[in-house]
Amino acid sequence: MSGKIGSAIPHLAWCQHHATYSFTKAVIESPTTSVEALSPTLIPFLFLCLSTGTFAVVDSDACLGGTNWKVAANNECSIESFKEALKPRFDKRCKRFGLSLDEDLQLLLGASSEKEARGEIEDICADAIGKRHPKKIEFSSISNKAKGFDAAFFDGGTSWNEGELQQLNKGSFRGSGARRIEMYDRQSKRRVVKWPDDTPTLGSCQANAAMCCWPDSGDVPAEMYGEDCDPIDGESDCTVSRSIMHNSTHPQLGNADICLVDLNKSRSSRFDDGITIFPNNTRVHCSGIAWENDANYWNSYLKGNLLFQSSMMLMKNGGHAKNLPAAPMCGCIEQMPIVTRADCTEAYTTARFVFQYRSTIPELKAFASKHLIQYRECKGLNATNDLRSFFDKLWWEKKVDSHQKEVFDGIVVGEGGCYNVTKAHLSEFVKNYFGPRQLDGNKNATDDSSY
């Protein structure tokens, strides 16, 4: 409670604590004097004061700060989950005193704004999660190859990408590399995999999203093999082109149309500038991940785990291994080919977070229970297993900002979006390189009808 009572005339004021009864300080200020009084512990108090001027009564304690308490939040540690767990206690004990939960929480944390309070909870959650996952897995330790292997792998240029570990007919893996991937798959359910910051295509993702796209799929329908194919004996003629470019007969091999590759944005391109345009209905297979700006949400905290699941595990289980022409196999969304859609994976846990407040210190801490890290098809705003819908959900929940959404929407354009985006890129390219010269009779190069 804070404010001025009375006017500049002598008066008698009755000051009583409005919420708690533990060591509450009332400060009486006037033009001629300043008096402090400390109340006894755990008893209501009356403070009588005589002043010749106006004074302010300052309550230094939040309503929530008067006693010890614990609340529990399931699945995630964030200011939203904390407030949801804390709300029943606040409504029962504090709501009648006029402050909102956000206002009282700011008092409790010593924060001057909601943004500052959010930062305090983020730090508390980071400490809780970090203590539960003290030792992280370096991404490079998964392959255990020489320096630079991971960068080449995400570009699509290693022996793994060329099928060193694959059985073509089954899309499965053999050898020590396969065993390492299986081992780290198990570990990734208990430990955090670090994001490969030193990888050029994944170093800094502006839109909080990354994607992998492949022209090949291991899910080859049996009817696409020759009549003499017997994949068991390994000696018959089972050769088949696994390219899914222009594959309208078996669209299940791809889950997206590729529109174009902007060579200027692709770090994997050997060209300084240009665009690669693909014909209509050119099918590819894409899978991606997206994460929140708050590092304590699971998708953000475990984005390295999600990258492993969306790249190496999909290569092992689905045979997806190669990159598209002039594009990385995996990269931050802004470096990837423009496509209509992508599958999507998210992380979740069964963790329970206990927030504990001790008034005698005072101190607020959080503790995380033991838990397994699990993965599933992401749940979007209006669809499941759809990266665009999932990103829309993050934006709707204000977990990413509008600029990040604009960058994302420029890459994953939605079904039927290839025509307009290709037309726009081609128009811009011609304008930049040829200027307003006449390319077709009297038609200007920027005239839509000239394409």
Image (cartoon, rainbow, N blue to C red):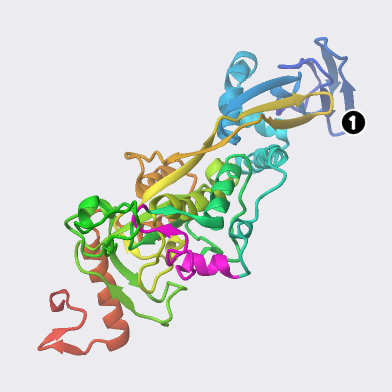
Whether residue 156 is in magenta: the answer is yes
Magenta span main SS? loop
The percent coordinates of residue 362 (x first, y second) are: 80, 29
Taking the image as shown, residue 291 lies to the left or right of residue 384, namely right
In the picture of the structure, the residue carrying the numbered disc 1 is 33
Whether residue 166 is in magenta: the answer is yes
Q: Based on the displayed image, in which of its 4 quarters is residue 51 positioned? A: top right
Q: Residue at x 38, y 76 (%)?
A: 263
Taking the image as shown, residue 120 lies to the left or right of residue 53, namely left
For the N terminus, give its image quadrant: top right
Q: Residues within 10 Å of mark 1 (few under 14, many from 20)?
A: few
Amino acid of disc 1: Thr
Highlighted range, magenta: 148-170
Taking the image as shown, residue 266 lies to the left or right of residue 250, namely right
Given residues 446 and 288, the one toward you in this image is 288
The percent coordinates of residue 326 (x first, y second) are: 38, 74
Q: Is residue 404 visible?
A: yes
